[in-house]
Amino acid sequence: MGKRAQRNRLVQCYLCRHRFEVGARAMTVSCPECHKPLLVQDVVVKTLQAVKKLQTCGSLVVQKKGRVIADLVEAHGGIEVIGTLHAKSVRGSRVRITRTANWKGDCHASSVQIEPGATVEGGYFHVPDRELGVEDLLET
């Protein structure tokens, strides 16, 4: 019977914080509110990524040999660090720092899981006792 029905998913613009639906297979879109281009796909880092900003409406996975060096890392779908992440500011819905991870920087997330053996070199962790709202994700 042909094509399988695709479901849309809800994303939040990491620039203006507007929430809207996108197609399940969308990789990039323009925000209907601020009209800026957005990355909505999941990002997997396997090697060195030295960038000013790494932002996605999807999730971020830093694999074991992966290394991210950035001023800002933001992934609304969650962040999992198996390798190295050094950033001034990290924002995500859920952050998981595995036992093999090396972390350096501030973190702002709705939940943080740090496995025994992980290396955490400083940084301020902000985990509110309620679900993150738009005001929590705005840069100060």
Image: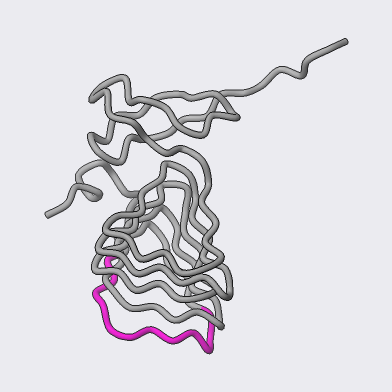
Specify the color scheme: one colour
Vertically, is 121 above or below 109? below
Locate residue 76, reporting x and y percent. 41, 47
| The N terminus sits in image quarter | top right
Residue lying farthest top? 1
Judge left or right: residue 137 versus residue 64: left
- Asked if residue 121 lies in the magenta stretch, the reply is yes
Locate residue 23, reporting x and y percent. 55, 24
Look at the image and give the residue range highlighted in magenta. Answer: 115-126
Q: Residue at 35% across / 59% down in the picture?
A: 109
Q: Quadrant of residue 72?
A: bottom left
Vertically, is 49 above or below 23? below
Q: Quadrant of residue 28?
A: top left
Residue lying farthest right? 1
Q: In this figure, what is the number of numbered marks?
A: 0
The prevailing secondary structure element of the residues shown in magenta is loop
Q: Residue at 24% across / 68% down in the picture?
A: 88
Locate residue 11, reporting x and y percent. 43, 33
- Asked if residue 15 lies in the magenta stretch, the reply is no
Which residue is nearer to you in this view: 37 or 3? 37
Q: Residue at 51% across / 34% down in the picture?
A: 27
Locate residue 102, reporting x and y percent. 44, 81
Q: Residue at 53% across / 86% down in the picture?
A: 116
| The C terminus sits in image quarter | bottom left
Vertically, is 10 above or below 43? above
Judge left or right: residue 103 versus residue 18: right
Vertically, is 62 above or below 32? below
